[in-house]
Image (cartoon, rainbow, N blue to C red):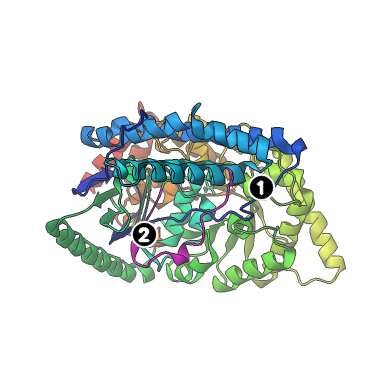
Amino acid sequence: MRSGDAPPRKSRRQTRLGGTPIMPGIGIGPITFAEEPALPNPRQKIAASDIQAELRQFDDAAKQARKQLGKLKARLTTLPEEAQTEIAPLIEAHLHMLGSSRLMRAIQSAIEDRLVSAATAVIEVAEDQARTLLALRRGADDGAAAARQAEEVRDIGRRLLRNLTHLPFRSFSGLPQGGILVAEQLRPSDAALIDPAHFAGIATEEGSADSHTAVMLRAIGVPAALGIPGLLAAARPGSTAILDGESGAIILNPGQRGLAEAARLRTSFARAQRGLVRLRRLASETLDHVPIELQANLELPFELPMVAQSGATGIGLMRTEFLFMNRETVPDEDTQYTIYREAIEAMDGDPVTIRLLDWGSDKEAEALVASDAISVAREANPALGLRGIRLLLQNPKLLETQIAAVLRAAAFGPVRILVPMVSRISEIETVRHEVDRVWRRLRTRQTRLPALAPPIGIMVETPAAALNAAAFARHVAFFAIGTNDLTMYAMAADRALSDRTGLYDPLNPAVLRLIAMTVAAGENAGVSVSICGELASRPEAVPLLIGLGLRQFSMHGGAVLRVKRAVRATEATSCIGLAEAALTASGAKAVHALIAQTAIGS
Ligand code: PEP
Ligand code: MG
């Protein structure tokens, strides 16, 4: 930014910004920004021998910041022109400061000359420069511009710090209650810290529908929208906003009329939710009496009572990642056992499918890197690297501990073991071998165990697993199709990125073909097949999925009754034609059109 070229003020006019819908519902409240992470050791000295490493880390953090801003800039074109003119100068200013600026040079010198860590240098230099800007121009005509420039320097400092430390946001519980939580981006581990009773809504600038953060937010159950371009620049803390989780829109500074309409919508949404409850006791079957099993995905333990009440007949996917988040050490066998047992007992005889740890990709491998117990090399392409079962096989102790905890918990009710991110048959053979070994060890010690070892199944979420499903069927007891990752790997499009190109779409015929192949392989071999990606929770996709032969769905607890309503309105035999048409459609758009036609016809 040229000096004196101050960025525009945030508007007080009513502004509507669109994003990706995540969790339906209407939230009304003041905007509350997520708090920045607290730095564990604010002033950290380093040895002269560490200078190069700290400079490299700082360089990486700056590169990452430029990339983040570059992405924001690219997405500006999707905003109304007025919003573009407001936000573009802000981004340019930040990019300029991240280039060869006084701020960057001062941070590098602080590391070299004052022998402080990169994080310390960022905090100290950003604050110094912000204060200098304010002091120089105090009382001058351009005082307001100086205040904004100082805030920008601090903003850049915070961004660099976040990139440097990988720390989660500070606890959200200190923030005022009843607001709309706004952040540039939330990581899954940030989302896991949110108390659903605390916020009226959640909105972020980055993020996408099938990311792990979205999965977490659905578990939390608060109206939410992600991937809203321009949100941070336009939102003023404390000003009122309406969040519509159904359409993905946020309305900033709404007028009286808008507020009254939103309040009315919120009431009718709550009434519709209550109306769904009557479905709980009704059978989950199509109009022509084909039974469709509806199970729940469990991401966080506090969902258990809701899942048990949702009408779900078991847990089709228990993601165990939450156990490893927001902690310094890896949970031991007893800690894991207690949590698995609680879930099994809460389901009261219905099966619980416990997935082995699926760490990596957008599930923040950095958090595990922090633990000495796990060896994870930093990778250029984490989604294509040591993720899920690959990471477990490299860390046998981690695998062994989790298997032992699951086997002990299985004494309290029916359990299935689900293996994530499988792409080779040898991986499943190793897991089976490990389960047998741990089983024998526990039995020798007279540990309480179930009569039979739990069945082992795989996530079908890599094209390799789907294409080779017939061979896998000879080695496993069940398939769980994970459309979130299957779409990412089939379309070579990141599930965690805001995507306006339509490339990432589980309804693309390429993904549907992989689903159909898996279903056929399962049917031929008598191996049960479920679908547990986010696609399973979309009522409009129900006829297509039934047409593809799926009879078992697993989704977040809040979606079970909505999906049941769709199942009960569907005729299974008439879905076969829809599925055939979708498999041969020219693209995802055509599949969406087919689904929309079916919805009109039903
Ligand atoms: C999937 O990939 O579809 C899935 C269910 O697993 P996760 O979202 O946890 O990666
Ligand atoms: Mg997955």
**Chain part drawn in magenta:** 164-183
Q: Is residue 552 left or right of residue 243?
A: right
Disc 2 marks a residue whose amino acid type is Lys
Q: Name which residue lies at 62% across and 38% down.
A: 110
Q: Is residue 126 left or right of residue 242?
A: right
Asked if ligand 2 lies within 8 A of label 1, the reply is: no
Q: Is residue 264 left or right of residue 459?
A: left
Q: Give percent across and percent down for residue 129.
A: 48, 41
Seen in the picture, residue 370 relative to 447 is either above or below; the reply is above
Residue pointed to by mark 2: 564
Seen in the picture, residue 448 relative to 511 is either above or below; the reply is below
Viewer-nearest residue: 86 or 333: 86
Q: Does the segment drawn in magenta span residue 49?
A: no
Viewer-nearest residue: 397 or 344: 397
Q: Residue 1 is drawn in which quadrant?
A: top left
Disc 1 marks a residue whose amino acid type is Val
Residue pointed to by mark 1: 476
Q: How many residues crowd around disc 1 within 10 Å: few (fewer than 14), some, or many (20 or more)?
A: many
Q: Give percent across and percent down for residue 472.
A: 65, 40
Viewer-nearest residue: 254 or 484: 254
Q: Residue 118 is drawn in which quadrant?
A: top right
Q: Name which residue lies at 32% across and 48% down.
A: 540
Q: How many residues crowd around disc 2 within 10 Å: few (fewer than 14), some, or many (20 or more)?
A: many
Seen in the picture, residue 200 relative to 459 is either above or below; the reply is below
